[in-house]
Image: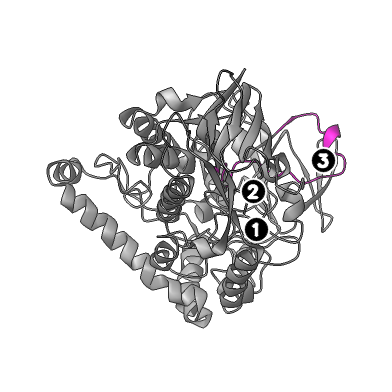
Amino acid sequence: MTEHVRVAVIGSGFGGLGAAVRLRREGITDFVVLERAGSVGGTWRDNSYPGCACDVPSHLYSFSFAPNPDWPRTFSGQEHIRAYLEHVADSFGLRPHLRFDTEVLRTTWDAQELCWDIETTGGRYRADVVVSATGPLSDPKVPQIPGLDTFPGKVFHSARWDHEADLTGQRVAVVGTGASAIQIVPAVQPDVSRLTLFQRTPPWVMPRVDRAVSGAERALHRALPATARMRRGLLWGIRELQVQAFTKHPNQLGLVERLAKQNMARAIKDPALRARLTPDYRIGCKRILLSSTYYPALAQPNVDVVASGLSEVRGSTLVAADGTEAEADVIVFGTGFHVTDMPIAERVVGADGRTLAESWKDGMEALRGASAAGFPNWMTIIGPNTGLGNSSMILMIESQLAYMADYLRRLDLLAGPPGPGGTGRGRAALDARPSAVHAWNRRVQERMKRTVWNTGGCTSWYLDANGRNTTVWPGTTAEFRRATRRVDLAEYEVLRVPRVRPAVGADAQEPVGGNEVTA
């Protein structure tokens, strides 16, 4: 049996739950949230490694429509963020819409009916609109290492942490130096017999000024919600002021580099180790990482830093690209995610029979980060060039939710009201014009040329295989909010199926005004 819904949302992380809340606030209840796992949370469900926490302040890393006065720390841990998302699902009545253990296998556009056929592990659905909220940090990336299959010990990615693996007294190799690795290393270092860090590129690390939020602060935010809004606004404003340095004046980041070097020097006294840990690119080119425990952990006698990536595995011997060898009992990959080649794109088949992955083979691009040409009534949350290098993604998500809401309102207007005599509503779809998508992308890429992400001299996960930055937004969150406040119908082709009326004396229906799809 196929269930027909107006909207199908894919994923139940911040983007998916935010979409569900916005749909209900718009008066839309005919929707489902398709989730491949058994609970909500997205990346904050999947990433449960030791030390996992957010590098954005808690009061900014939450929905504006669901403030949490009881954040326990200024930078909250994974367990608190996941609990917050469970609370959102409960308090906004989202549970009836959630379909757990329902992985989307294929989504195909039906050009005759103007809807999406969705095949999942939990059954089939048809949806007028699909909102993809799978997120860029959902599918782990593990490099192809020759001989990895010969390793006798446990191997896992940070986003698939093996909680049955006891690392106490073990020789542990951590591969990668991204945001996950710098949290894992200090969390496990005291327990392992030896920790070897394979560092292909050193990160810039600033202190993480984290502390417990006092009971008095929490009581104040509960009693006077305006104080929490002011706190959030201050955090937002500071980060908005920082954007110019990242996007237009990267040379202004020199002072921040000096502060980062001082942070390192306080913990790393060995000049040789300091040299290995000092980046050779402009700070901000990769995401600036926050930790007050990473460098102290690397300075401990049971830690080795290999200034080279892992290139080969020979049984329990790990070989770096520079020839350095290390013995290990456990390998932990902190090697990031499929960001510019999201697997969901291989499962979406558009109007011309091509998958989204095929459409994006030369690089991801979507109108206002939401709509891809040739994929009518398909929207993405945290789409191409909507990422941030210094602030909270929740701000960008909420802007895209506003765009989604206006998109659905436009579809309602285009479909028209129900007609007399049992006549149903017409069906309408919006397909982003290729010219509009390309024009938007050209403007974004032109602005990207001056940013630190393109000029800082590094290779980061912000860049795709062609060296193009298809992930980050080169402006402020306020600019993006203005750009996504309303849907401009001139940027879309309107597709219609004429409404139908019951045939006299029969169950069959005939179209009013013809049966062809008209644009």
Residue 228 horizontal/vertical position (percent): 22, 50
Q: Is residue 114 left or right of residue 355?
A: left
| In magenta segment, residue 255 | no
Instruction: Identify the amino acid type marked 1.
Output: Trp
Q: Which residue is mark 2?
A: 336
The reply to whether dot 1 and dot 2 touch (C-beta < 8 Å) is yes
Residue shown at 15%/43% (left/top)? 216
Q: CA distance from mark 3 to mark 2?
A: 23 Å
Mark before the other along the chain sequence, 3 or 1: 3
Q: Secondary structure at mark 2?
A: loop
Q: Nearer the viewer, residue 292 or 473?
A: 473
Mark number displayed over residue 317: 3
Residue shown at 65%/62% (left/top)? 460
Q: Dot 3, crowdedness within 10 Å: few (<14), some or many (≥20)?
A: some
Q: Secondary structure at mark 3?
A: strand
Mark before the other along the chain sequence, 3 or 2: 3
Residue shown at 31%/60% (left/top)? 235
Instruction: Identify the amino acid type marked 2.
Output: Gly
The reply to whether dot 3 and dot 2 touch (C-beta < 8 Å) is no
Q: Which residue is mark 1?
A: 461
Q: CA distance from mark 3 to mark 1?
A: 28 Å
> Compared with residue 385, is residue 450 higher up or lower down, i.e. above or below?
below
The stretch of residues the image draws in magenta is 131-155
Instruction: Identify the amino acid type marked 3.
Output: Thr
Mark before the other along the chain sequence, 1 or 2: 2
| Closer to viewer: mark 3 or mark 2 | 2
| In magenta segment, residue 141 | yes
> Compared with residue 408, is residue 435 higher up or lower down, i.e. above or below?
below
Tell which residue pokes out farthest to the front in this image: 504
Q: Is residue 118 left or right of residue 242?
A: right
